[in-house]
Amino acid sequence: MIVGVLVEISNQNVDKVFDYKVPKELEDKIKIGIRVEVPFSKRTLEGFVLNIKNETDIDTKEVISVIDEEQVLTSELLELGKKLKEETLSTLISCYQVMLPKALKAKHNTNISKKYDTYYILNNKVDIKLSKSAEEIINLFKEKDKVKKEDIVKISRSSLNTLVKNNILKEVKHQHYRLKYNNDNISKKELTTDQLKVVEEVRKTNGYEIFLLHGVTGSGKTEVYMELIEDELKKGKTSIVLVPEISLTPQMVERFEKRFGDKIAALHSALSDGEKYDEYRRIIEGKAKIVIGARSAIFAPLKNIGIIIIDEEHSDTYKQENEPRYNAKDVAKIRGQMNNCKVLMGSATPSLESYARAQKGVYKLLTLQNRANGKSLPQITIVDMNEEMKYSKGHFSKKLIDEINDKLEKKEQVILLLNRRGYSSFITCKNCGYTFKCPNCDITLTYHKSSRTLRCHYCGYGTKVYEECPSCHEHSINDLGVGTEKVEEEIKKIFENARVLRMDTDTTSRKGMHEKMITSFKNHEYDILLGTQIVAKGLDFENVTLVGVINADTSLNIPDFRSSENTFSLLSQVSGRCGRSSKEGNVVLQTFNKDHYAIRYVKKHDYIGFYKEEMKVRQTLKYPPYYYICYLKVSGKDMNESGIEAQKIKKVLDKYLKNSTILGPSTMALFKINNIYRYSIIIKYKYENDLNDVLKRLQDHYKSNQRVRLDIDFNPVHL
């Protein structure tokens, strides 16, 4: 027997299947989709078995061992990996590795064990005289078929061992999973008339179809999702639900658990390696029918999928920024076709590309225009900070301070959004203008007051804060800009009795902190929740009646063609966090740019108005959804060499891509990251039949180049 093995090295030069002989004693264990251990050059590596045949034309080495008893890559995932490789121009091994939890990746020395509970079972057939202690143990079995080892606390281990030795008790081990779900109090809500209309519209469809659900914040999209999933469960089918952030996963899991109990499984990066391994096995074994998680949950090894749901479909977190550069929405469509199932994407602010496709009839448009509680959307007040600066306290306008005080008096809660973490943007010298920059990257260091450190948020470099300027040696260090730590400090000074919870990447880095913070705020242990984008999406707190945005302009100033769309979406989403129950909500947006159309349309809750205005801009500038984009990054340690190679690539593209607009090469906004210099080339096209062939040839040319690297990204979410 000969097997074709794809080894664990993610390198274009070895991205192919290698043949190995299978020793006779291992032949019965071999299956396509399992991992095996094989010799490779002078190393021992793990790899996936992709094919089995009887003979080969070349001399081959032997498989050392078989790692898995059952497939870790199902036939569907094997096929999906090949499609992903073609669509993203990534290595095949990287496409398979991204699908699996750490314990199942082809990676040598990864060892995560299954967990077991030890139980004792009474052997009723044995009839001998028992000691008093033995009788005490036997009495435990009068009401139970089996007793857990940990429950027998008063009896010595030696007595237990004697009973096992005499065959009075049998010791058995039962596998258990690290995450537990509650099957008690399973309940469902009655759907509103609007929600029922949407559900009925989806029910009419059999087979593959893509739906876009445009539902305002608080319209009850999650209830629609659960109703449609229940439909599929009744047919014996499974479901995938994607959420954009791991911070949203606990809330979504909690809601689904109340409806479906232990039929659910969670897959996201906040789980431990052991928890991911257990959840993955529950899915493979068919014990979990509904998978909920962030981006990578789209690869869950479910069989017979009936529906794939993508919540907050506008979110850029569905796109993976490193190889393989896939978008979970695109993978969902591929799996939808492979399973002949429905794909439902929902958002209060759909991406322009999705809404344009819905307008063309490529997707079926569904709408929920009203909140499920019958309340109107919150009233939004725009505060012009150009006028307010003279009256404000720190970063808080008089209007926002008054509103917060009013809510605190009423024992209601407040969410404040600041789209930046850290204490301040950067540290500079008031005397000579010296700015503290990362030695590895072309960027200023961010000041974190709690740890008194300066950190680079790109390469991880950190250093202590100096009291003295390294350039002029004056004691004139000043912090500029604004970060969550600084705003938290201001809140505590202005609202002395308020209980403040800060939620950003720094405070939520420890395992379980997202869930802990959300629960504590929900239980009103805090009055004010201050956070970055984490607090803008999906969170549902009944007692939140005010949302304040410290600086609504931040994302407008980013040099990216999506900056207006991202700003409109972020502000609309965070506005929707208030007034979600019986209490009315209102929003205060502080801005230096009150006349920008993104701000104006947010105030009116007018997605359609924003869509029409932004589409004019996109058409004029030849950006999506009117044109596709392919983004090439050319990088290396030598600035000049990388620049020369980027120019060569540009000439090749100009020569062979006649139907495209080629922009660049230009230095990237962050030109130097971790001592690597980076250039970009942008390809804009509508139809370009030769694009993949040309890019593959370029990729082949540079795959052996140790000094200059070429990265290719189709339809990037950021430029």
Image: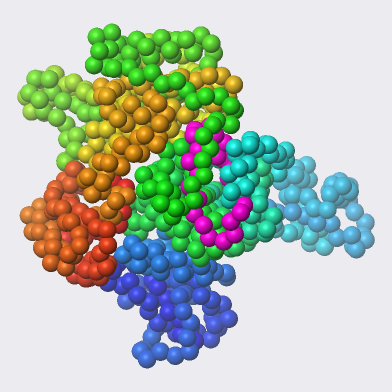
- Residue under the image location 42 percent in, 76 percent down: 5
- The front one of 299 and 233 is 233
Tell whether 462 sits left or right of 534.
Answer: left
Q: Nearer the viewer, residue 708 or 244?
A: 244
- In the image, residue 234 sits, relative to residue 422, either above or below, namely below
Name the image quarter holding residue 233: bottom right
Say if 562 sits above or below 507 in the image: below
Image position of 507 with respect to 22: above or below: above
**Along the viewing direction, whichever of 308 and 112 lies nearer the viewer:** 308
At a point 38% along the width and 71% down the height, the residue shown is 7
Quarter of the image where one finds residue 314: top left
Q: Quadrant of residue 587?
A: top left
Count the numbered circles shown: 0
Give the magenta-colored segment's residue range.
Answer: 203-225
Nearest the camera: 527 or 274?
Answer: 527
What residue appears at the point 24 percent right and 69 percent down from the top-left corner? Answer: 690
User: From the viewer's perspective, is 54 left or right of 571?
Assistant: right
The x and y percentages for residue 379 are 45, 20
Give the image location of residue 355, x and y in percent.
41, 46
On whether residue 210 falls in the magenta region, the answer is: yes
Q: Position of residue 450 (x, y in %)?
A: 33, 25
Image position, residue 287 (x, y; %): 65, 57
On the question of residue 97 being in view, the answer is: yes
Left or right, residue 530 beside residue 516: left
18 left or right, relative to 163: left
Q: Kindly tell me whether residue 641 is visible in this rendering.
A: no
* Name of the residue lying farthest toward the front: 360
